[in-house]
Amino acid sequence: MLLNISYMGVLTVCAYFAIQNLLFGDGKAKGIHIFCLVFIATEYALWIASCFWISDIWTNPYFWFDFLLTAEIGLFFPVVNRAVRP
């Protein structure tokens, strides 16, 4: 439980800095900050869906948020590659 609380704290700090850099940053790494916010929102949705875990059937929203999170991890590398190119 302490690990989940600390993980939530770290993601909240990351979200704060992503919003701050999105609003006041130079704009070059805008895609990374948007991706970071989408990833954090999906993580929070996954945590909320896991609280109401009912059964192991495909209609459970936990599976769909988990699949979405896995797809986002696969999309992370093209976003970073686009942001770090000169």
Image (tube, helix red, strand yellow):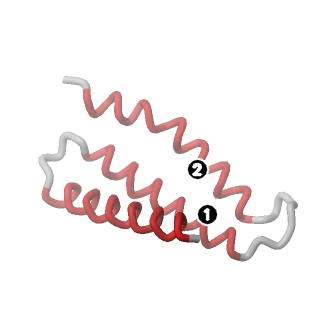
Residue picked out by circle 1: 46
Residue 15 vs residue 29: left or right?
right
Disc 1 is placed on an element classified as helix
Give residue 45's quadrant in the image.
bottom right
Q: Mark 2 points at which residue?
A: 69
State if disc 1 and disc 2 touch (CB < 8 Å). yes
Residue 52 percent across, percent down from the top left: 73, 76
Task: Name the spot of residue 18 as percent of width and height, x first.
Answer: 28, 57
Judge the density around disc 1: few (<14), some (14-19), many (≥20) Cα neighbours within 10 Å. some
> Which secondary structure lies at badge 2?
helix
Tell which of 59 and 20 is nearer to you. 20
User: Three-letter amino acid code at disc 1?
Assistant: Leu
Q: Which residue lies furthest to the bottom in this view?
A: 52
Q: Is residue 8 left or right of residue 12?
A: right
Residue at left 49%, top 70%? 5
Residue 78: percent from the left, percent from the top?
A: 42, 30
Q: Looking at the image, which residue is at 47% across and 54% down?
A: 39
Query: 33 above or below 7?
Result: above
Tell which circle, 2 or 1, labels the residue nearer the N-terminal end: 1
Quadrant location of the C terminus in the rendered image: top left
30 sits left or right of 50 in the view: left
| Mark 2 surroundings within 10 Å by alpha-carbon count, few (fewer than 14), some (14 through 19), many (20 or more) | some
Name the residue nearer the viewer: 84 or 5. Answer: 5
> Residue extending furthest front?
2
Inter-mark Cα distance, 2 to 1: 8 Å
Q: Nearer the viewer, residue 26 or 40?
A: 40
Look at the picture and state if 85 lies above or below 55: above
Q: What residue is drawn where x is 28% and y is 34%?
A: 83
Label for residue 20?
none
Q: Quadrant of the N terminus?
A: bottom right
Kind of residue indicated by mark 2: Leu
